[in-house]
């Protein structure tokens, strides 16, 4: 029998597995665990009494059914003073008719439209810019017509973070629950995306936001000249904009249960995949180390599983049972820690996918590789420019 102390292959594999284990341990115990810890802390806070007036802005295009279903939930928020501005982007459907009906019922709802003459700029960014220009208040909350708050205290929960020195507030959004492998996959994917960018923001390293549930001051928007640096890009009104203006001192995360937004499942898988690839494209423009940090975690997860299988085979072939047992123990410990953080976060954010998360954790690196392949093989300009 070859002793473990003298087998260089086993020593190398032990060192490699150990290093990857420590990398994974860091990510799950430090940045990824922050979201559910913050949720637990914020849910214990008393009712918010800091409610400065604010403006909710969304851009609609052929979203009549979504407006009819979701807009009343935003218009009926338990909030003392706010306005909702909907910018219509040449909708061919019934958007304008729905807005007229709702305007007659809700005096704090206002509507405007993007001129047909607008060219060579992102119409989404132009719509948000027009909404901000028309707004009366300092705080701007942005969302989408297909998003619906889970609580009438959504705005109150966001406003809890509207404090002196704070310019940006990031919130959580995910899909409605349901059955099916694809739905559980995209909910799990959105969960870990949120664990990443919200966890980083909580630790003082914000690098992106998602424009379905976030707020910022009008002053910082104007000071930054709005979306000037990404005006001709079809994306970037959320992640690239926040990446440019956010820092450790001016950004807060709203993680309480009342602040959650929900959205419907994409009608086709291609819609979701194209959206993911678009974020991969804009992510290539991020400043800072966030993109590299995320890649390190994904690749370390994949290499950890591969090294576990290789080490297991080597241990069995060489009959090194102590080594084999050690490798199995390390894999089990990492899996238990990862599943604990995943499940606690899923429970905190109201996601019923805990039973699926083990499968997702194993397949996640492969999903990431397929998206990066799509990003490389397709024309970038299809995702970046109008």
Image (tube, helix red, strand yellow):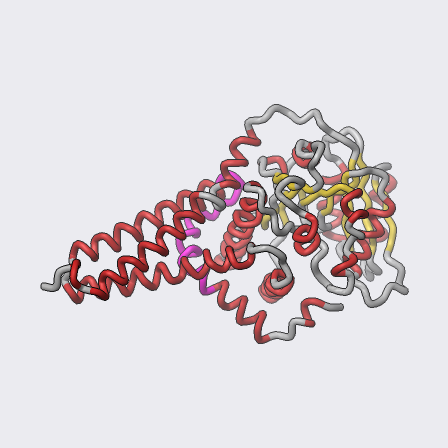
How far from the left and from the top, in percent, is residue 335? 35, 50
Q: Is residue 377 above or below residue 149?
A: below
From the viewer's perspective, tell me whether residue 361 is left or right of residue 372: left
**Magenta-colored stretch includes residue 8:** no
Give the camera-side residue of 198 and 293: 293
Give the camera-side residue of 16 and 87: 16
Residue at left offset 76%, top offset 49%: 58
Q: Is residue 352 above or below residue 107?
A: below
Q: Locate the N terminus and report the quarter of the image it occupies.
A: bottom left
| Secondary structure mainly formed by the magenta segment | helix
How far from the left and from the top, in percent, is residue 10? 22, 62
Instruction: State the image quarter where residue 219 is shown.
Output: top right
* Residue 94 seen: no
Give the camera-side residue of 351 and 68: 351
* Residue 207 seen: yes
How far from the left and from the top, in percent, is residue 236? 70, 58
Residue at left offset 67%, top offset 36%: 158
Residue at left offset 40%, top offset 61%: 302
Q: Which residues are magenta?
A: 347-366
Q: Locate the C terminus and report the quarter of the image it occupies.
A: bottom right
How far from the left and from the top, in percent, is residue 138? 80, 38
Give the residue furthest to the left. 1
**Magenta-colored stretch includes residue 350:** yes
Residue at left offset 83%, top offset 41%: 109
- How many circles with numbers are drawn on the protein? 0
């Amino acid at each position: 029998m070859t002793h473990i102390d003298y087998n260089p292959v086993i020593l190398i594999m032990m060192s490699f597995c150990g290093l990857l284990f420590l990398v994974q341990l860091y990510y799950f115990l430090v940045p990824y665990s922050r979201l559910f810890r913050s949720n637990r802390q914020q849910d214990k806070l008393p009712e918010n009494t800091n409610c400065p007036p604010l403006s909710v802005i969304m851009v609609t295009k052929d979203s009549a059914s979504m407006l009819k279903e979701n807009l009343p939930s935003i218009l009926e928020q338990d909030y003392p003073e706010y306005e909702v501005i909907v910018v219509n982007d040449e909708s061919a459907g019934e958007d304008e008719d729905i807005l007229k009906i709702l305007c007659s019922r809700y005096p704090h709802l206002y509507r405007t439209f993007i001129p047909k003459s607008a060219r060579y700029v992102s119409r989404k960014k132009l719509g948000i810019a027009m909404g901000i220009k028309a707004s009366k208040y300092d705080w701007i909350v942005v969302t989408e017509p297909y998003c619906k708050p889970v609580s009438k205290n959504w705005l109150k929960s966001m406003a809890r973070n509207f404090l002196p020195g704070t310019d940006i507030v990031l919130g959580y959004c995910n899909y409605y629950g349901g059955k099916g492998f694809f739905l559980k996959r995209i909910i799990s994917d959105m969960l870990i995306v949120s664990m990443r960018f919200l966890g980083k923001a909580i630790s003082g390293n914000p690098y992106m936001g998602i424009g379905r549930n976030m707020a910022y001051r009008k002053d910082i928007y104007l000071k930054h000249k709005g979306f000037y640096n990404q005006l001709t890009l079809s994306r970037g009104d959320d992640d690239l904009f926040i990446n440019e203006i956010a820092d450790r001192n001016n950004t807060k995360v709203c993680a309480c249960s009342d602040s959650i937004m929900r959205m419907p499942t994409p009608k086709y898988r291609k819609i979701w995949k194209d959206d993911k690839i678009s974020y991969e494209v804009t992510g290539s423009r991020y400043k800072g180390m966030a993109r590299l940090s995320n890649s390190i975690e994904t690749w370390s997860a994949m290499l950890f599983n591969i090294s576990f299988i290789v080490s297991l085979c080597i241990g069995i072939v060489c009959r090194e049972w102590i080594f084999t047992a050690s490798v199995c123990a390390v894999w089990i410990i990492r899996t238990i820690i990862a599943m604990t953080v995943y499940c606690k976060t899923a429970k905190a954010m109201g996601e019923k996918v805990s039973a699926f998360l083990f499968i997702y954790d194993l397949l996640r690196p492969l999903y990431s590789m397929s998206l990066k392949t799509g990003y490389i093989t397709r024309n970038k300009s299809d995702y970046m420019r109008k």
